[in-house]
Amino acid sequence: EIVLTQSPGTLSLSPGEGATLSCRASQSVSSNLAWYQQKPGQAPRLLIYGASNRATGIPDRFSGSGSGTDFTLTISRLEPEDFAVYYCQEYGSSPLIFGGGTTVEIK
Amino acid sequence: EVQLLESGGGLVQPGGSLTLSCAASGFTFSSNPMSWVRQSPGKGLEWISVISSNGGTTYYADSVKGRFTISRVNSKNTLYLQMNSLRAEDTAVYYCAKKGGSGFYPNGWYFDLWGRGTLVTVSS
């Protein structure tokens, strides 16, 4: 079973700053990686699939990169609505695995 | 409007059973594979099960295999999760989610539409 390790656990940033979130897989998942955003009391929302493809309606300040075992979600300039928890998920093998999440909080 | 709406959650005693439903609208339900994902209070996301568009193929996480059954009735645009032999560690918000990509499991199994979730609490 693949393990996804997200870092850091918490990012404390100010609106307007950039954010870089990491997701590392214990073995290669090729480009079979997605990123989600979750706000308190809400369901997750798909941001990125295929490691670098933005989902429908996702602003271009969100970008994904990486392949194999190392992946990055970058938020170029944080908007107030971007403060949330972010999860990566691999779909290269069974079972489907989610990372433990990174919280992006207001500094 | 494209949406998924879960129902059926509640308080159940350890060892008990519960059936969750997920009503789909705004898209062709019968053409889309579906899944259940859960989230324990204050914790991360855990995939539970997937089902093919015609219901003929299913997969389960080891943590629920043999206790949970996923099913669907396409004529009713509804997905189900039958949960038996419930344990305290099954306490979570249960989400239904639609497969976003294409290909055979696990390929393409990211989730592009989620419901709001229903809370299941297993406690005496």
Image (cartoon, grey):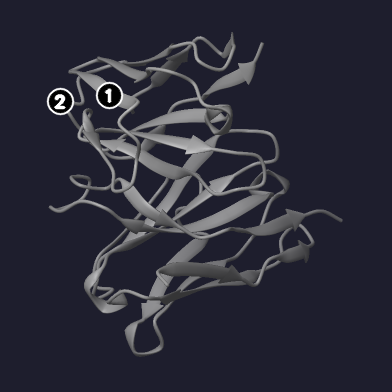
Callout 1: chain: A
* Identity of the residue drawn at 63% across and 19% down: A105
* Identity of the residue drawn at 34% across and 90% down: B75
Q: Indicate left or right for B82 with A6 as reference.
A: right
- Determine whether B84 is above or below B89 in the image: below
> As rendered, which of A42 and A95 lies closer to the eye?
A42
| Coordinates of residue B42 in the picture (x, y in percent) | 69, 34
Nearest to viewer (mark 1 / mark 2): 1
Residue on which the image places disc 1: A64
Farthest-out residue, front: A16
Callout 2: chain: A
| Residue A24, quarter of the rendered image | top left
| Coordinates of residue B115 in the picture (x, y in percent) | 51, 60
Q: Quadrant of the N terminus of chain B?
A: bottom left
> As rendered, which of A49 and A30 lies closer to the eye?
A49
Residue on which the image places disc 2: A30
Q: Amino acid at mark 2?
A: Ser
Mark 1 and mark 2: Cα distance apart in space: 14 Å
| Coordinates of residue A16 in the picture (x, y in percent) | 50, 15
- Determine whether A1 is above or below A65 in the image: below
